[in-house]
Amino acid sequence: CIMCIYITLNYLFLTVCLCVHVFFFFSVPTVPQQVSLSPNLETQQLTLSWLGGESTTFDIMILRTELNETVFYETVSVTADKISGQHQWNWTSVEPLECTSLSVQIRSRDGQTTSDWSDTHILPGMDLPSNKDSQMFPQDRVVSVGTNTTFCCIVEEGLGFGSIRYRDLVMNVTRLSRRSYAMTQINQGPSGVTGTNVFCSSDEKTLLNGAVVFVGYPPLPSDLVCETHDLVSAVCQWNRGRDTHLYGKKRKTYYTLNGRYFTHTHTHTFMNQKWSACSLAQWDGNFTLVARNLLGQYSLTDSSELSLRVRPVAPANLTSVVRAWNATLLWQWKHRGYDSLALICQVELTSHWHTTTRTFSGVGLRSVIVLDLRPDEDYSIKVRCGVQQNFWNWGDWSGPLAFRTSIDIPDAPDVWMWIERDNTGRLMWKPLTHRESHGQITGYEVTLWSPDENIQHTETLPQSICTVPINLTHISTTGSSSNKVIATVIAKNAAGVSPPASIVMPLRWTDPPAVSRTAYMDGGFPLSWQSDANASCGYVVEWHDASCQQDCAVEWIKVAAENTNISAQSENFQPGVRYTLSLYSCSSEVPQLLQRWEGYMEELVPSSSVPHLSSNQQDSNIKLSWGEIPLVSRRGFLLGYHIYLNNGSQLMLLANVSDPTSRSYTVKGLPVGSYKFTVKAYTSAGEDTGATVSISLESYNNILFSIVARVKKAFYPDIPEPKLAGDWSRTQGPLDVKPSPHSMVHIVEEPEWDSSKEALVVIPEEDEDEDETGDEPVDTDEPTSLRYYNQVIDDRPIRPRFPDSSASSASSLDSARTDVTYTGIQTSGNSLGYRPQMQPGSLSQDMASFGGYQPQCSWHLDSPVEAEESGGLAPSLGSPTSVASTQFLLPDSGSKEQPEGKGQGSSSATTWFHNLLSSAKP
Amino acid sequence: MPNVNLSNHLIQTHLLISSWSYNRKKESLSPDLTVADGRLVTVPPPSSQLDTRDKLWRLHSALLQCRSLLERAITKEEEELGGAEKGDYQSQRKTVRDRLSLLLANTGELLKATDGTAVLTPSLEGLEIDGPTILFEVKLWIYRIFKELDYWTKTAITTLQGLPSVTAKERGRTTAVRRRRSTRR
């Protein structure tokens, strides 16, 4: 400039040119003047203002004063305010402005040319030494979910910094100054009710200070709907929407409706949503709701005519006038405007947890008659209404009103009859249910009337009785020429007597028709029949337990005349029980038994095995015989019997006797030896556990031979006693022999006869198992040991082997009483499985224990009772008749498997022989 | 006869103690952080020279301050931090307040029993009853109130247990009354 002035003075023309030229090449931007800092602590915004001449570009540098760290250094474009000439620029700090002091400098920039920096201006932080206390910033900040917030902790003068925790999470920190530390929590989640705490602690883990931040959402209500209850005012409600997570009077959401501010709104929860409601005194037609909190606001609108939004209030003061079969329900309206309002109302009726709804309508409706109620029944009733025209919504339900209907006369009882074979009978009726009683039943009245004789007998019974025995024989012999009697039952309660229920009872038992079978399915026995022309009043289907003998529980159902099939259903049906179902026609005469069925709800395996299972040798065959399983034990329709050969560990099926009426089976072709047979009855559900019998199949020649020997022994007992050969003095005791598990049949070879007094005797299984009583031995899968006793045989000349008196023996004895009658057939005394073979020359002792087969003694069978009653001491025989080798022999069924003879004490050969004969009684 | 049931007080104490620990847990204040004590209740210092009545008066005064602080704390907490549904904390806080009132009534009755005169209401002057405004400090203040409650209910037990003569005297009086009643029968 100095140069410019100089040139101007000497060379006027050039002066101008040079001066301009110098100005353009050498002018410097103005240094910003009057810099001022204006902080907004809440927004963490720092407003910088300065005078900067013509410049529009400035370099701004912000440093943390204490540590001289650059926080911000950028070139910004700022135009001057046209009036004041001031430049103004805002900077938002990541950290709260209180955290530490900030130094600000500005310089003007013109392209690459800059002015000098302005003087440093400092925004003092709260960490100045003069503020000795610990502090934390920001405090009580409210921010949106997902945002980041930076907190700083200024440590108390003289203490060491420890950590900053967001909730209980220790955060990474940045040191801002000597005493100030900062951390940033990013993407913050919503707070709890009392906000999220940030804790600052010292290096000694002492809490220095802290802050609470509230992280939430702006309000987002929905579903604003306004309606009227009183036809004048408006009630508006809205869904509050998501939880803002902002609570407390400063942070909660405030609502205005049409500009009216509501401090309190009625709030309720519906379908897991929170709803608010408030009222306006007049219906405006247009409604605007504004929801506000510290994070934002949201508006909703609704508009409608009043007539389209009428939702009646709940009916008030419900009362009722109650009768037996209906009730009048009355209520009141709070608002007069309802008098002319066409209403539609729902009446909800609840009885025994069953609810029905009836609908009524009318102008100003305030009473209805509720029909089809039941007498003596508790009801709960409530009402709600809507408008008939422009129906908007149902109003609220009234409070419930409870009442009990009046009582009425009972229904007629359901009557049936039962005739026994001995012409006694029972009159039965089903106890009236609560629904049929119409009030507490006080009793029944039964009248028997013989139409021909016109004799009537009436009896009053208490309400607990629902069956009475009737002696039809007595009635029929008291001069009545009729073959029927009319029985009438009426039920009584406090309201009166029921209509009479009558049935015509026959005076005599009639034989039932043929029985067919019915299979239970879909919860009942399906029954169908041909229509019967005489069934003027339909049919009765009756059923009972087929095995029941007396006072049977009978159930029945009455079927309309047009029906010819039903499914007989009862909750009393049990699996494994045979039911007899009978169809009767109903008319003015005696019910006629038309058809009969039998069936099982579910067939089971028989609960007991065949009784009286016995085995007899016939020539070289074995005949197995058994009794009939009682009906109650069958538990299904018997389909047949499985015959097994039982080797103790395994059962081998020999035959399937598919005729359930069969009572015997002959096993043929077995070699000589000991056998066990198991017989199992089966139904569609499977087999029973089985009954087992043992037998020793003898050689046919041996039998003949032994018979001769026995006769000889019986009449010539003084045969010299054989001597022991070898040492047989071992202690008596069992010799356990395990049968080979591979052999299906364990055949014990007959050893050579030894003249020793000791003999091997098979112990039948029944003897070993004391628990196994009765005639149904249980099969086991375990291989059974055959147990032999080297016992010393009684050395008395003759020792018949009869069953002893033990329980198992008794059952064996019982099983011996088979219903097989063979006249002139000899039975064996004992069918023990095995005994040592006798030498031909010394039969005497073994005769006593064997006794398997005897000559036929047909003459003595005429007096079996006498023989039995004598207990084995039968009268002496006369001269023996011929003993022919062709004699037909049978094993003694009475001994079964028992090794010991019943008449063991007898020493008389004659008696023994006689007993053998008498055991073959028919 | 004041209904001084020590076992009942023990239960109360337990409740009060659990209140501040519950409060601490609720506010996720880590257990390893120590919160410096800040006494809010102002009473004369304890001394072995104090007689029974003075001890009781000191206790009663402290409990009275506790109740005032608690009432204020509840109000402030509701205003600043409440608004949501009432939960376990709120119901426990109410129980604490009720039990504290019962304890106050008992100590008041005892005070009356010691000299037969009406209990003078201790002055609450100087008590920082308004509390802070910054919410973290409000929380800390409430926490300290619960700590004070804990301290003074424990002190109440110690003090009441140290008054055998009073209770014995009262017991004797009760026995005498019973005797008189049975004589009348």
Image: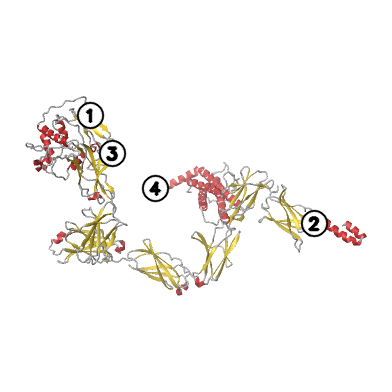
Q: Nearer the viewer, mark 2 or mark 3?
A: 3
Q: Identify the chain of the residue marked 1, using the numbered disc in the image.
A: A
Q: What separation in Å lies between label 1 and label 3 (alpha carbons)?
A: 27 Å
> How dense is the environment of label 4, judged by Cα within 10 Å: few (below 14), some, or many (20 and up)?
few
Q: What separation in Å lies between label 2 and label 1 (alpha carbons)?
A: 139 Å
Amino acid type at mark 3: Ser
Secondary structure under tag 3 reads: loop
Check if mark 2 and mark 1 are on a common chain.
yes
Left or right relative to A100: residue A277: left
Q: What separation in Å lies between label 4 and label 3 (alpha carbons)?
A: 91 Å
Amino acid type at mark 1: Gln
- Label 3 sits on residue: A649
Q: Nearer the viewer, mark 4 or mark 3?
A: 3
Left or right relative to A293: residue A308: left
Amino acid type at mark 2: Thr
Q: Nearer the viewer, mark 2 or mark 1?
A: 1
Any part of residue A157 in sight:
yes
- Label 1 sits on residue: A732
Amino acid type at mark 4: Thr
Do the CB atoms of the residues marked 2 and 1 lie less than 8 Å apart? no
Secondary structure under tag 4 reads: helix
Residue A864 location, quadrant? top left
Residue A584 percent coordinates (x, y): 23, 62
- Outermost residue on the top side: it is A726
Q: Identify the chain of the residue marked 2, using the numbered disc in the image.
A: A
Q: Identify the chain of the residue marked 4, using the numbered disc in the image.
A: B
Q: Nearer the viewer, mark 4 or mark 1?
A: 1
Q: Which mark is residue B183?
A: 4
Q: What separation in Å lies between label 2 and label 3 (alpha carbons)?
A: 121 Å
Do the CB atoms of the residues marked 4 and 2 lie less than 8 Å apart? no
Q: What separation in Å lies between label 4 and label 2 (alpha carbons)?
A: 111 Å
